[in-house]
């Protein structure tokens, strides 16, 4: 991926101490190597003065009052920060003299409210040669969106954290587009069924709520053979079979509903058939579908599995299974009926760091975290587990647990004795657990009978359920 080349350049800059890089807290938790990078103020100022001298880029920062007295120069890259709509005198010369030369335009609104795109000052109709357009925190009218679709040389279009309500059908003219970021701030986005015509597209960021305009009820993606990343994919709006046919897909984030025409076997086969860099998916399953097929996929990093049908489908976890190759780090199970202890299997997942079990009808009574299980688990959520009466944590289990959240497990009789051995546990939240709440509190200076289990935890929050009028 092009990302790998960029990260190699960043490696070299970090090695020379020109930038400071911050890695992700957990190796392998993200497909990106770096979480962020920063430069020292002195180097930042040096860079700005140098690029201004060489006329590489012009930066206008209204927070710092930078460049207020300079004249508009014939630059190819213009960056405007914190524009609020009242600084037109400074921007007007750029619109008059430099707009036809600009190849990259980035305009950021850092205020807490959205403002209308300054079309009278930064007229998109004049920026015919734009390759890069980034705009954050602005409201785009229908006419603004049509003007964007006329920028036929665009390779990168980012409207993240902006407000707009439709993409025009003329968006298909952007045949050079490689990145489309349409993650609008709120509301539903109407998209014409023409994205499949953008053959150069490599990165596609969709909004969470989509309305497809056209004869087809679902957005067509088949034919995007260069697509490497898709964010906010949802089989409710997009054809899941198209996702399975994208040959160069490396990164997936989205939701897939298992239906008659798309099965968990299809998803599992897709995840096994190629080396995916990162997979973060929510799968909604129906009756008589085994989640084991998904748990054994070695190229899934984050998995949220929910039950769809009522009554709750029964799912069985095998007692013996080899998941040594699994790189699953986050798992959420929601809305199932389970007969046998799921911890027997889940505790063997070698890279599991975040686990949440919620709204589950458990018929086994007690769950057990056996010794040497959950060796990398850091966060554990247990909520709404109907039928859970006991929980045992053996010594040597979940040694790295740092956060525990328990809520609305109304039949759980007490906290496990083994919590007192978890020295890494820093935070415990207990909500709506009347069965043992008084036992773990300190009331009028008197410790409850089970308080000794959690005395070593610095962040303790114990509360009753919220009562809504």
Image (tube, rainbow, N blue to C red):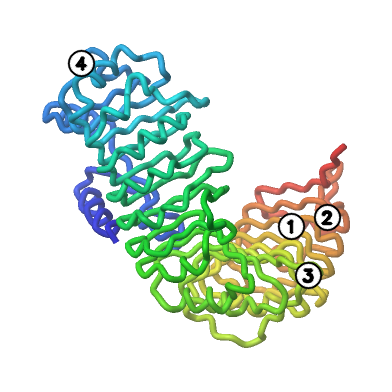
Front tag of 4 and 1: 4
Instruction: Specify which label sits upstream in the sequence, 4 or 2.
Output: 4
Q: Quadrant of residue 417?
A: bottom right
Closer to the N terminus: mark 1 or mark 2? 1
Within-10-Å neighbours for mark 1: few <14, some 14–19, many 20+: many
In the rendered view, does 21 fall on the left or right side of 169?
left
Disc 1, disc 2: CB below 8 Å?
Answer: yes
Measure the C-alpha gap from mark 4 to mark 1: 59 Å
Decide which of tag 2 and tag 3 comes sooner along the chain.
3
Residue receiving disc 4: 70
Q: CA distance from mark 1 to mark 3?
A: 22 Å
Q: Nearer the viewer, residue 182 or 123?
A: 123
Name which quarter of the figure residue 249 lies in: bottom left
Q: Dot 4: what SS?
A: loop
Residue at image coords 46%, 66%: 243
Q: Which residue is mark 1?
A: 406
Whichever of callouts 1 and 3 sits on the residue coming sooner in the sequence is 3
Choose mark 2 or mark 3, whichever is in front.
3
Badge 3 is on which residue? 312
Q: Which residue is mark 2?
A: 433
Q: Is residue 34 above or below residue 385?
A: above
Asked whether disc 1 touches disc 3, contact meaning CB atoms under 8 Å apart, the reply is no
Residue 292: image location, x then y, percent: 61, 79
The residues tagged by marks 2 and 3 sit, at their Cα atoms, a distance apart of 24 Å
| Front-lying residue, 182 or 27 | 182
Up/down of 248 relative to 164, above or below: below
Foreground of the two, 133 or 385 = 133
């Amino acid at each position: 991926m092009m990302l790998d080349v960029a990260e190699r350049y960043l490696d070299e800059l970090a090695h020379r101490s020109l930038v400071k890089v911050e890695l992700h807290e957990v190796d392998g938790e993200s497909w990106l190597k770096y979480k962020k990078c920063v430069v020292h103020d002195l180097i930042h100022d040096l860079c700005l003065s140098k690029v201004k001298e060489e006329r590489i880029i012009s930066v206008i920062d209204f927070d710092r009052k930078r460049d207020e007295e300079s004249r508009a120069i014939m630059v190819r890259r213009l960056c405007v920060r914190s524009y609020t709509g009242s600084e037109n005198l400074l921007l007007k010369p750029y619109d008059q003299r430099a707009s036809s030369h600009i190849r990259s335009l980035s305009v950021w609104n850092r205020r807490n409210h959205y403002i209308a795109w300054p079309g009278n000052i930064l007229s998109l109709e004049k920026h015919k040669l734009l390759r890069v357009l980034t705009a954050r925190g602005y409201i785009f009218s229908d006419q603004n969106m049509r003007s964007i679709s006329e920028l036929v040389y665009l390779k990168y279009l980012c409207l993240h954290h902006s407000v707009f309500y439709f993409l025009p059908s003329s968006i298909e003219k952007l045949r050079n587009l490689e990145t489309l970021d349409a993650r609008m701030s709120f509301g539903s986005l109407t998209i014409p069924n023409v994205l499949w015509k953008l053959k150069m597209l490599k990165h596609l960021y969709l909004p969470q709520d989509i309305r497809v305009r056209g004869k087809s009820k679902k957005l067509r993606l088949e034919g995007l053979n260069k697509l490497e990343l898709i964010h906010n994919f949802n089989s409710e709006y997009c054809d899941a079979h198209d996702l399975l046919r994208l040959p160069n897909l490396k990164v997936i984030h989205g939701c897939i509903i298992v239906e008659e025409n798309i099965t968990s076997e299809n998803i599992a086969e897709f995840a096994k058939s190629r080396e995916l860099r990162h997979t973060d998916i929510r799968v909604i399953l129906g009756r008589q579908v085994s989640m084991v097929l998904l748990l054994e996929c070695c190229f899934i990093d984050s998995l949220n599995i929910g039950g769809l049908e009522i009554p709750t489908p029964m799912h069985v976890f095998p007692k013996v299974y080899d998941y040594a190759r699994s790189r699953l780090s986050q798992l959420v199970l929601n809305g199932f009926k389970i007969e046998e202890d799921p911890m027997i299997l889940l505790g063997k997942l070698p890279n599991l760091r975040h686990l949440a079990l919620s709204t589950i009808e458990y018929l086994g009574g007690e769950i057990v975290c056996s010794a040497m299980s959950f060796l990398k688990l850091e966060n554990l959520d247990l909520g709404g587990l109907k039928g859970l009466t006991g929980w045992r944590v053996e010594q040597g289990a979940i040694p790295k647990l740092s956060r525990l959240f328990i809520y609305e497990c109304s039949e759980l009789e007490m906290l496990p004795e083994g919590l007192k051995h978890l020295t890494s546990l820093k935070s415990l939240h207990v909500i709506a657990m009347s069965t043992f709440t008084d036992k773990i509190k300190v009331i009028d200076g008197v410790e409850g009978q089970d308080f000794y289990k959690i005395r070593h935890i610095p962040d303790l929050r114990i509360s009753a359920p919220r009562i809504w009028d």
